[in-house]
Image (cartoon, rainbow, N blue to C red):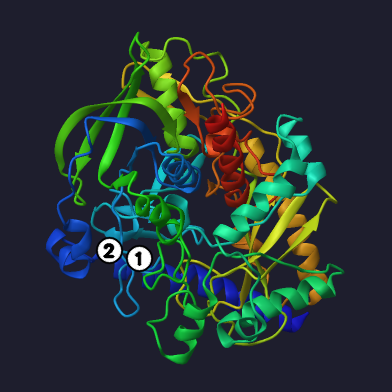
Amino acid sequence: MHRRAFFKAAGLATLAGTVGSTLTGTSAHADPRSAMFESWVPEIFAPVPDAPAHTSAIVIGSGFGAAVTALRLAEAGIDNTVLERGSRWPNDPWREIFTGDDLPDGRGFWHRTSFTGVTKVPMSFGAFGGVLDVTEFAGIDVWRAAAVGGGSVIFTGAMVAPERRLFDQVFGGVVDYGELERVYFPRVRQMLRLDPMPGDIYQSQPFTHSRAWDDQVRAAGYQPVPNDSIFTWDVLRAELAGGSRPSATVARSNLGNSNGAKFDLNQNYLRYAEQTGRSRVYPGHRVDSIAQEPGGKFVVTVTKLAPTGAQLGTRTLTCDKLFLGAGSVGTSELLVRAQATGALPNLNEHIGDGWGTNGDVVLARGASGLAGFGQGVPSASRIYDESTMPLTLENWYIPGIPFETGALASLGMVLDPTRARFGYHPATGGVGLTWPTTAQDAVVHAARTVDRRIADRAGALAEYGALGYDANAEFTAHPLGGAVLGKATDAYGRVHGHPGLYVMDGAAIPGSTATVNPSLTITALAERNIEAILRG
């Protein structure tokens, strides 16, 4: 007890004092000007051609659902234009293409000057068109991508299938889990080369925290289950051997991996789509509105953006078929605004409904011994618990802290039934929602109960609850819903009331992917849905 009390005090002092003064002080005087960014990453400043005035199909967004759609349309002989508001970032084994979230600059964030992450430490920097958009709604901050490749650029790489019984509980029979299990999960695993962390990576120093995490959950009576991951393990081996600038082994993930350690969509679906000659990606093309003409043609209004945020012009594009893949928030915003303004007058009453956070909560508990834990990014394992609410805890690194804290982090995903609805504000033309604090409280209580049980049974040296560092559900990195399958659309993403309009992304999912990361489910559903759409 004396030892635990000592480390509790030491750990809290470190988090409250050293982190705050170091990160805030260093970031506050950063002055990332356009010329500096252009010298670091000239590729994103290269002129981008205008998208064609008319294409057979337009795909809005370039994340998991959109990338699948672009490839399968192209393979079917359908020319398509992919519109992405963010830049197309390169990879390089030695350059620092992206910034880190410990001392970030504008490359990290989409046109904002401050950010408070899971550490609750405020950081400031110059505005720029970086890769992470933090959208602030009442009661919740939503982290979403602004880059070619969408969420695949900024996620932590875990791609896990939900359990059948929990999936069926969420989807209510609209989607046949057996079909996903037989056909579409395996297809995605093959396309994205998913596999668990190899033993040599797991045993390396940067993943000491993963082994310590697993030891603790075993001491508490759980058996950790390996996570499939999108990371290219040979790139991590190169980092460990000095053959590449460290990235995935030194806490670089939430704001991108400079050396391409993540096998993101730029390296697979999007690349394969462009190689057909029938699909082309246009960065810096922000979609502002969508509409449908009486004859059936879709009208898409876009603003062309420079990486600095400068507006280079506005155009109106048309297409015969329109596929929405701008993410839960982006797709929902476009549909809700189009319904409210009469641009898509036949949308039904379910547009904007069914939104949830996937029950996201980030947690920290003390370690059971003194060690240098490392900051390896890929998540090695997870556990499942349903003693309070059904939930998964996933081994995680600690983002935003550049030194050892004596803490082991987890990402929790709780099966939370809470749903919110997007609404339109006529005075501003904005779309927003309100997330209830009761939902935050419920997921924090459930995840904290399990995490504290593990800490107690494993003899953790520090406790972080006194300053609120042990659990945080004030954000979500997994927004889902707003145009849900079987309600706003049919069971395959065809939007009711407007033939030729489709939802292909996380907006189609009813607020949860049943206690696991959404990326595999979103990608598999997109594969399933586009196959049915093309067949039809």
Q: Is residue 385 above or below residue 140?
A: below
Identify which amino acid the numbered label 2 is placed on: Ala
- Residue 323 x %, y %: 44, 32
User: With 215 as the anchor, is 278 left or right in this view?
Assistant: left
Residue receiving disc 2: 28
Identify which amino acid the numbered label 1 is placed on: Thr
Dot 2 falls on a residue whose secondary structure is helix
Q: Measuring 32% from the left and 74% from the top, which residue is drawn there? A: 92
- Residue 228 x %, y %: 65, 64
- Residue 528 x %, y %: 61, 39
**Which quadrant of the figure contains the N terminus?**
bottom right
Q: Quadrant of residue 7?
A: bottom right
Q: Measuring 70% from the left and 85% from the top, which residue is drawn there? A: 369
Q: Is residue 187 above or below residue 43?
A: above
Judging depth in this view, the residue of 320 and 168 nearest the camera is 320
Q: Measuring 38% from the left and 73% from the top, which residue is drawn there? A: 259
Q: For residue 307, say whether it is visible.
A: yes
- Residue 267 x %, y %: 42, 62
Residue receiving disc 1: 24
User: Which residue ends up furthest to the front in the rendered image?
Assistant: 77
User: With 335 as the anchor, is 439 left or right in this view?
Assistant: right
Q: Quadrant of residue 169?
A: top right
Q: How crowded is the residue under tag 1: few (<14 C-alpha within 10 Å), some, or many (20+)?
A: some
Dot 1 falls on a residue whose secondary structure is helix
User: With 189 as the anchor, is 133 left or right in this view?
Assistant: left
**Which quadrant of the figure contains the C terminus?**
top right
Q: For residue 147, say whether it is visible.
A: no
Kindly check if marks 2 and 1 are in contact, taking CB atoms under 8 A apart as contact: yes
